[in-house]
Amino acid sequence: MSVREVIVEADGGSRGNPGPAGYGAVVFDADRVGVLAERREALGVTTNNVAEYRGLIAGLEAAAELGARVVTVRMDSKLVVEQMSGRWKIKHAALIPLADRARRLAADFDQVTYRWIPRAENSHADRLANEAMDDGKLVEEVHAADPATTPPAEAADPAVDSQSASARLSGPGPGWTGAAGRPTRLLLVRHGQTELSVQRRYSGRGNPPLTAVGREQAARAAKMLAAKGDIAAIVTSPLGRARETAEAAGVALGIEVRVVDGLTETDFGEWEGLTFREAAERDPELHARWLGDPSLPAPGGESFDAVRERVEAVRRDLVARYPGANVVVVSHVTPIKTLLQLALGVGPSLLYRLHLDLASLSLAEFYPDGGSSVRLVNDTSYL
């Protein structure tokens, strides 16, 4: 889906200022009738203003993903509206990198206008922000009930010995991005080879096992991950080919693997098991449109937009559960591409242009201030 003109409404809150915080953002069509996208996220402990800026950033990112060119931003934060309009100076150090990030996003549109609205007119975004803060409370309760979900102390300590395994894997963030704090680093591993991947067929919710080559690829990926060390958790798609790849890493690292349903591959519906040519010949018009429209599902299947929604929820959960830690994520082409898309802050065209090899490794980082970066894509040097 691509739209030219949208309205972004955003809000953020903190229960304590600073305190448990979250943001919400919603993208409406130009008439403010249809909801095109929603975003919300718990932020841990921070201030109202930081949460408000994070909401603005999320709203602009969502508008960019929709292909919008003209954006009207409506917020009940006088501070954010006046600062982003250039009428007020930004004095608080924590807000400077967030405002810079918002300006960089805004520069990619043809026009962005900022308008202040009363809180009563920002109820949709306010509701999302409060839901995010409620989510944050739930994550804290999970941590309290299960200490295993909390990363070890050394994973959250930025002052590590430069010769330690932690330093080898989790060095300082790229300074030019302006991101601050220690990121949650996701080590994104695609599963090993199956018969369908050898034949280059659509392989979504089907469950082909790894081939002998695939098992060898999984073993080599596991050896590479064990050599890196300092892994707080391993999560995997529920599908067998991913679980088998993840279990090899779990044995090598001595870590129990956790299954996350949101990491499953796209449901290709009636195209499951077909080659690219066979699907194109079966549904020529639909297949051609599907290749450029992430809102369009395969017949009886799932759209890439739907995949993005569940993968974004997984990303939020992993960042909340494992702040400042390294997490191995074993999944499939579309979820891994989507996580890289989220880290890069780019539109859906990446899904159609990026190649990922079997058992490859990519690295995406998500920072506590909302920044993100990609350090590696499609490494297969260990295979």
Image (tube, rainbow, N blue to C red):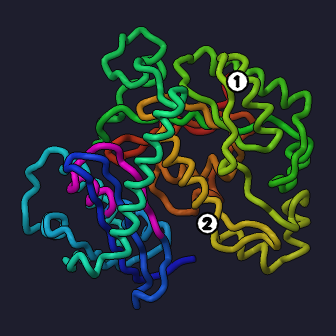
Does the magenta portion include 41?
yes
Q: In which quadrant is the N terminus drawn?
A: bottom right
Does the magenta portion include 377?
no
Residue under pointer 1: 249
Instruction: Residue 261: tell me if it is visible.
Output: yes
Q: Classify 45 as above or below 108.
A: above
Label annotation for residue 305: 2
Q: Classify 325 as above or below 333.
A: above
Q: Going 75% across and 74% down the picture, which residue do you hit?
A: 288
The x and y percentages for residue 71 are 34, 77
Identity, as a three-letter code, of the amino acid under mark 1: Ala
The x and y percentages for residue 238 are 75, 43
Q: In the figure, is residue 295 to the left or right of 5? A: right
- Nearer the observer, 304 or 253: 253
Q: Going 41% across and 55% down the picture, which residue do you hit?
A: 134
Q: In the figure, is residue 196 to the left or right of 65? A: right
Magenta segment: 38-55
- Nearer the observer, 232 or 304: 232
Q: How dense is the environment of label 1, judged by Cα within 10 Å: few (below 14), some, or many (20 and up)?
A: many
Q: Going 33% across and 61% down the picture, which residue do you hit?
A: 55
Q: Quadrant of residue 148?
A: top right
Q: In which quadrant is the C terminus drawn?
A: top right
Q: Secondary structure at mark 1?
A: helix
Q: CA distance from mark 1 to mark 2?
A: 30 Å
Q: Quadrant of residue 160?
A: top left
Q: How dense is the environment of label 2, judged by Cα within 10 Å: few (below 14), some, or many (20 and up)?
A: some
Q: Going 42% across and 75% down the picture, which residue do you hit?
A: 27
